[in-house]
Amino acid sequence: MSTLRDSRSRSIDVRLSSKFVKKKRFLQEEESRIQRLIMFRLLSASVAIYVLAGCGVVVTPYEAEANEIHGQITFIAHVEYNDTANWEKTLKTAQRRCRTLGYENVKAFEGIRKKCVDSSIYDGIGGCYRWELERIYQRTNEPGTS
């Protein structure tokens, strides 16, 4: 009778062992699948953040003021983080305006002034979030200067 019990318990042990191994293998595969899914999502989110953070907008500055007496035209652009201003377009506009007044050309006067108009905590260090860029062009009678 003891041999009968031993063979039954062994067969039960083998069946339990087999189920345990299958369950363990299934759990390992499931864990591996979940880890791959998490890594894929983290990688996708990282790439999206990197791409969005690196994307800047090209802003066309607008004419803010024209002083015909002094022959100056002021252009202003509001930019955020990685935005850039299209100063070539403003140069062409200023040249066109000055030519209508009888002047040959314009040149940039004093470079670009940069003023913070919105500081915030978005960049993590409390720096400036939004800038106002100002460029003044001065009329000249010199051909081909800018």
Image (cartoon, rainbow, N blue to C red):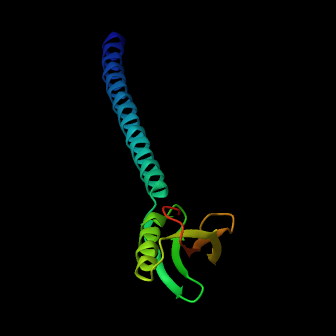
Q: Quadrant of the N terminus?
A: top left
Residue 12 % position (x, y): 32, 22
The image shows residue 11, relative to residue 76, as above or below, that is above
Name the residue: 53% across, 80% down. 73
Name the residue: 52% across, 86% down. 66
Q: Residue furthest top?
A: 3
The image shows residue 51, relative to residue 73, as above or below, that is above
Residue 121 seen anywhere in this rendered image of the structure: no
The front one of 137 and 81 is 137
Residue 17 % position (x, y): 36, 22
Quarter location, residue 5: top left
The front one of 17 and 22 is 22
Image position of 96 (left or right of 126): left
Quarter location, residue 16: top left
Give the number of callouts: 0
Image position of 102 (left or right of 16): right
The image shows residue 19, relative to residue 122, as above or below, that is above
Quarter location, residue 25: top left
Residue 89 seen anywhere in this rendered image of the structure: yes
Name the residue: 32% across, 13% down. 7
The front one of 9 and 75 is 75
The front one of 13 and 69 is 69
Residue 132 % position (x, y): 58, 76
Name the residue: 43% across, 52% down. 51
Residue 133 % position (x, y): 58, 73
